[in-house]
Amino acid sequence: MLDLRNCRQYMACCLRIKDKKGNIVPLKLNKPQARFYEQIQALREMGLPVRVLVLKARQMGFSTVIGGMLFWDSATSFNAQSLVVAHQDEATNNLFAMSKRYYENLPEPVKPLRKASNGRELEFAAPTNAPPGTLGLNSSIRVATAGGRGIGRSFTFKNAHLSEFAFWPGNKNETLTGVMQAVPNEPETMVAIESTANGYDQFKDMWDEATEAWNRGERDGWCPFFAAWHEMDEYRMTPPPDFRQTEEEEQLAETYGLDDEQLAWRRWSIKVNCGGDINLFRQEYPASPEEAFLASGTCIFDQNAIVLWLEHVREKVIARGRYAYDYDGQRITGIRWEEASDGEIVLFAEPREGCPYVIGGDTAGDSGGEWSDFFVGQVLDNTTGLQVARLRGRMDEDEYARQMYCLGFTYNKALIGVEINFSTHPVKELDRLNYPNLYVREMTDTYTGKLKKAYGWKTDPITRPDLIATLKEVARDNLHLIQDEETLKEMLSFAKNQRGRPEALPGKHDDCVMALGIAHKIRGQQRTTIREAPEHHGEKLISKLQRQRKGRR
């Protein structure tokens, strides 16, 4: 027996769609649609208002399943108003036609009363000429095109479907704000934003923020949901007899577990669907979120290599947290590691006894009294160049210096080189705390004209191009040395501006990139061999981390 409160059963039994061959068929969820439905149910079981961001490949049917879920709620519940907003009129008309098709093909026993409506709304209410006392659901599905004035104003909606958000015209944020204010923050409500990528825009920013928050364990905001093209069973094709994988295809097969039928379809789609433009394919049919949002061709690093490597570093973190310590105003003692899910420091490898390390630091810039960037420290094993830890956070300068102090002692009194362009305070603080191993640069005394030595790294028109060239070489020849997901993501948006200067794209950050470059440039002042005598502080931390990991198992 049909249970009207079971959305999935209702969609399978009652809703009809037009398939890609033009046939009217039951709505049977494909794999990505089913996984999306399960995610929505999980959010509901947690008692949360459903707020989900869907990043997807083309033609996966997310508009169909989201539309089906909204239709189910509005066609079976009292006072369930739903809103659909698309990026252009043609798409709006198509989504409204889909809702009308759902209604027209409903079995009569479950078809709600419908009031005569215009081309922008399905109103499930008693018809005007209905006998007195006839009750309707007083629910509706309203559609609109983004860019219009007042979308969502003066209404209250239980559900909203925002389609192809990355391609909305006009002020996206203004329209989105109007919609979100019209949907109460209640557990039974749902807002689904679904879109293919459109470069580095507001959708990209929302995705990054949602992903970072979700990874921190925060569940009270947007839930990011990604669907790769190879999840679709129909995206495969019989390969020709002489089919041989290219080097790139071999990497794709290894990274994502693709077979020859999927790779054959990929070749065909690049040629036919994307006019031979492989970058367009990556945007329209991404295999990962990073691939979907690839910047333009001005990126100075090999984006495709970074995207593939990102899939291998996502589980590299062995510990996350920050340092606690005792401080009497002069000295730091009692350094201890504290695990924290929101910690500014991530460790990828424990310190090795007697191993030499270097730490490159990039300080945050100031904007209107607030830090516009992050304080960063990148830790390298100087025998190999392997990235073993990373500090990244917004904090006061003195606290940054103290965390770097602790990090340096953890990694066997690592050589620390902090950039001094914006502020010399972190370096001066490390010196005041008597940190024993600071990077020294040569500089000209402005009074005597003689060379003198000073602590800290200075980025200038001479050192900056050299730093970037070194980092490009590392990324090209030894990308496996970079273990940090955040650093790799910054590299994807590190591109040449209109003047040809490599820097972060507007609205993005390059703190991790620059700190990593500094770390590589200061390596010459640190030894490259392992000493036999143990560094006792690092040894203590090793034991503690080992105990913590055993406790988590």
Image (cartoon, helix red, strand yellow):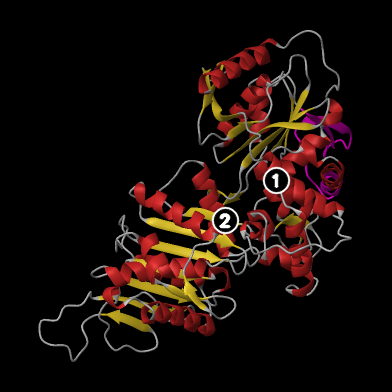
Whether 522 is drawn above or below 121: the answer is above
Q: Where residue 311 appears, x then y in whole percent?
A: 69, 45
Q: Quadrant of residue 84?
A: bottom left
Q: Where residue 63 appears, x then y in whole percent?
A: 50, 70
Secondary structure state at the residue bearing disc 1: helix
Residue 105 shows up from this direction: yes
Q: Where residue 264 appears, x then y in whole percent?
A: 78, 62
The residue indicated by pointer 2 is: 226
Whether 479 is drawn above or below 286: the answer is above
Asked if the magenta segment contains residue 456, the reply would be: yes
Whether 330 is drawn above or below 11: the answer is above
Q: Is residue 365 left or right of 501 when viewed as pictured?
A: left
Magenta residues, as a range?
439-468
The residue indicated by pointer 1 is: 310
* Amino acid beneath label 1: Leu
Mark 1 or 2, closer to the camera = 2
**Number of numbered markers:** 2
Tell whether label 2 touches label 1 (CB within 8 Å). no
Q: Is residue 469 left or right of 411 when viewed as pictured?
A: right
Residue visible at 36% across and 66% down in the picture: 159
Q: Where residue 66 appears, x then y in whole percent?
A: 45, 66
Can you name the residue that lies furthest to the bottom here? 129
Q: Nearer the viewer, residue 290 or 30?
A: 30
